[in-house]
Image: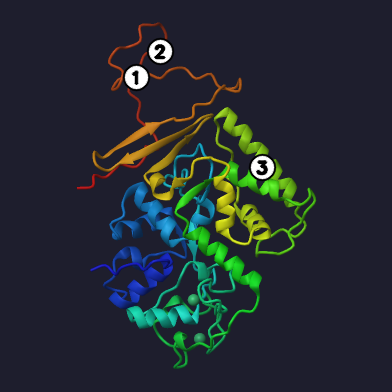
Amino acid sequence: MMLAIQPEETLRSFVERTLLIKGKHSSEEVFRKFPRWATRVDVLKIADTLGWFGCHGLNKILHRHTNYPLTAVFKNIQDVSYSRGEYLSYSRWYDYNRNPSGFCPVCVAEDIERLGFSFWRRAHCLKLNVCAEHNVELVKRCPACDKQFSHGGHDLGVMWRTCKGRHLKDSPVTVNTDPFELKKAQLFTDILSFTHHLSEEAVLAVLNEKKIHKDAVFEQKIWNSEPDRHWGTEIERRLGIVKNCRSENSLPPDQSTDLIIQAIVETYESFADFVWDVKAYRDEIRPIESLWSTYKAGDQESPHFVEENYKYGVGVWSCPFPAKRNWGVWDWRPVYYPCCNFERPKRKGPQPQPVLVENAPPGIYIRY
Ligand SMILES: [Zn+2]
Ligand SMILES: [Zn+2]
């Protein structure tokens, strides 16, 4: 029987907990062979064992058990997929065993009271310093031996064992006194658990109005801030690109959302206040789950998407925002597929030929 993954639990925590409870030899291969760098393929295998299949399953696990929402919550309005082409890609990794994990001793004690065991939470394995719920400092090193909770230090199994006879739940609790650290932790937690996508254009427009002056630099740093960055100028530049792409019906290139998150931390007291302003922009606020079954397929001048339909086991192709001009570069001609176009074009020149499809998209399962 499969163990249940806990709300907010990281993939690696779930893997390590399964190996410990079920035993290394009797656990499924996907757990035994979970690599140091977990890619889409490894994440999909874990999703499969949970009964979460296809593109929907990948996005469900990315949204609930990784930090991917920090990217996905801010979404271009013309992007109808949760994670763009991640379902087809092999490049990105979502979990790395050298990223240090951490825990809140109060959360751990409460879990043990409630469930009989604890686990590693995704927000506590980010480089945050405080638990947003309890306002206590996160423990990033073993209180008994000072090792980090990552490759080269303790493996995550120490959560369910002890170190030098000490259990992690007995770690000393230090109350946080830095309001900025608490605000930062709450903002990240709010983004991770947010239920809707916010329009990228609305987000940038709202932040653009907030900037104090063009040369403003971030005063309060989060971990990956570039110290001398003139964020006002950068937000304005990105807003220009996004607006231009919208008018042309092309998707802007993927950009890190670090700048957006940093700008929100800098200018708002809470994520709820920010969302309030973004809603006033009146772009559609789409529920997160509504985009889980759809992935972006193909990078041409217009974004193309496939929505998986699990009732019939078919993919529904669409190009909801066809490019308004072809930039003078492409010269697309209609393609006739012998299987779909029963009436053959009566013209000279090349006629339809059966061609083996390369890199075919994945098959779609049927949910009975
Ligand atoms: Zn806590
Ligand atoms: Zn230790």
Look at label 3 and name its amino acid: Arg
Q: Secondary structure at mark 1?
A: loop
On the image, numbered disc 3 is attached to which residue? Answer: 238
Name the residue type under label 1: Gln
User: Which quarter of the image is occupied by the N terminus?
Assistant: bottom left
Badge 3 marks a residue whose secondary structure is helix
Quadrant in the picture for residue 138: bottom right
Q: Is residue 191 above or below residue 168?
A: above
* Residue at 74% in and 62% down: 219
Q: Is residue 262 left or right of residue 271?
A: right
Point out residue 80 in the picture as x, y percentages from the top left corner.
45, 40
Q: Tell me which corner region of the image, top left, top right, bottom left or bottom right, holds residue 112.
A: bottom left
Image depth: mark 3 or mark 1 in front: 3
Q: Residue at x 41, y 71 (%)?
A: 13
Q: What's the residue at 49%, 56% (across, down)?
A: 68
Which residue position is annotated with label 2?
350
Label pair 3/2, CB-CB below 8 angstroms: no
Proximity of marks 1 and 2: CB atoms separated by less than 8 Å:
yes
- In this view, the residue in front, 327 or 339, is 327
Please state the horizontal and vertical placement of residue 349, each as a whole percent of the image: 42, 9
Q: Nearer the viewer, mark 3 or mark 2?
A: 3
Q: Distance between the Cα atoms at labels 3 and 1? A: 44 Å
Q: Tell me if mark 1 has few (under 14), some (14-19) or many (20+) residues whose alpha carbon lies within 10 angstroms of its own.
A: few
Dot 2: element = loop
Amino acid under disc 2: Pro
Q: Is mark 3 within 8 Å of ligand 1?
A: no
Precedes in sequence: disc 3 or disc 1: 3
* Residue 209 or residue 231, whichever sits in front: 209
Look at mark 1 in the image and give the residue it sits on.
353
Quadrant of residue 32 within the rendered picture = bottom left
Q: How far across and down, in percent of the image, does residue 249 sit? A: 54, 30
